[in-house]
Image: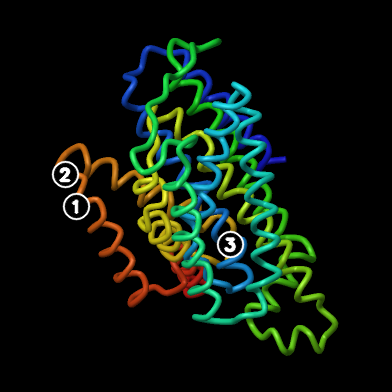
Amino acid sequence: MRYWTACLVIVLGMSALAFSGINNYFFFAGFVVLQAVVLATAWNILGGYAGYVNFGVPAFFGAGAYMALFLHLALDAPLIVQILGAALLTGIIGLLVGLLTVRLRGIFFSIATVALIFIFETLVVNSRYLGGATGLQLTQPDAIFFDNYQRGLVVLMTVMAVIAVSLARYIQESHIGRGLRAVRDSEEAAECSGVPTLKLKLLACTVSCALLGAAGAPMPMYLSYIEPASTFNLLYAISALAMPIIGGMSHWIGPVIGALIIASLQQIVTVTISSELSVLVVGVLLVVFVVAAPDGIVGLVKRWKTSSK
């Protein structure tokens, strides 16, 4: 009950802020931070729990964004439908890709996921309907409940972050999470113990990719513009990898902590210094934690609690 109460307080608190007179930049930056929470949590379901490192995050993120664009152009669908459509499409793609790649292990799986980025980007670049290489300029619809569309987007992204974290929490604490951890520790031993490794990996791949696509769906309306180069940017893969590592991949709260720290620091550095240095922040923190604290902040806290007893 404490967890669900906290989730309700977070959603209601963000909704109250959206109705307040706080500066609009808070919501512009808040969207990025909450989107980072969804990305980190989605990546960790496959990369952290199962140990399958997915470098193809931009492929599913971009596929979700362009699926949302297609539904907007073709059907003038509302944003909720766009998000659901993007999650469905990328979930199916994740399942199909999983059938072809999860039998690969280590660096071979990671290379296979990277190839998806260039495949999807090439398809979009050669599609005039989706704007091609030059992209498309979009007009945000009128806000229904809030002063502007940006505030409503942040509230919606808050709900999406709560759903993503709740899914990750459920997976971790259920038999699915135990099976995925067994796969991560030793897939051969897990198979010998009767763990349905292939089914669990396909499930993790499908859920992870669906959440990645859902995270990308609001992006076109958030920016009022979309083009392939930035949508399929490899920086999404680096950030999605760095945030769980810094926060801790062993627990569902780890990616949340890592996302809040990295995304917030990036926004601060972008505003105060320059956007180029925001990438440096991710790189420096990633190196420091990989060397000094490979288990992330969650691991440091566990170690501190054990030593204090």
Q: Which mark is residue 251?
A: 3
The residues bearing labels 2 and 1 have C-alpha atoms spaced at a distance of 6 Å
Instruction: Quadrant for residue 7, please give it.
Output: top right
Q: CA distance from mark 1 to mark 3?
A: 29 Å
* Contact (Cβ within 8 Å) of mark 2 with mark 3: no
| Disc 2: which residue | 274
Residue lying furthest right: 194
Residue topped by disc 1: 277
Q: Position of residue 67 (x, y in %)?
A: 57, 39
- Using residue 181 as the reference point, say whether residue 192 is left or right of it: right
- Image quarter hosting the N terminus: top right
Residue at the spot x=43%, y=59% of the render?
237
Q: Looking at the image, which residue is at 70% across and 53% down?
A: 92
Q: Nearer the viewer, residue 68 or 252?
A: 68
User: x, y percentage for residue 77?
Assistant: 62, 24
> Toward the viewer: 111 or 29?
111
Q: Earlier in the sequence, mark 2 or mark 3?
A: 3
Are circles 2 and 1 on residues that touch, CB within 8 Å? yes
Please name the residue shown 75% across and 68% down the image: 200
Amino acid on which disc 2 is placed = Ser
Residue at 58 percent across and 72 percent down: it is 52
Question: Residue 174 at what x, y percent from top left?
Answer: 77, 61
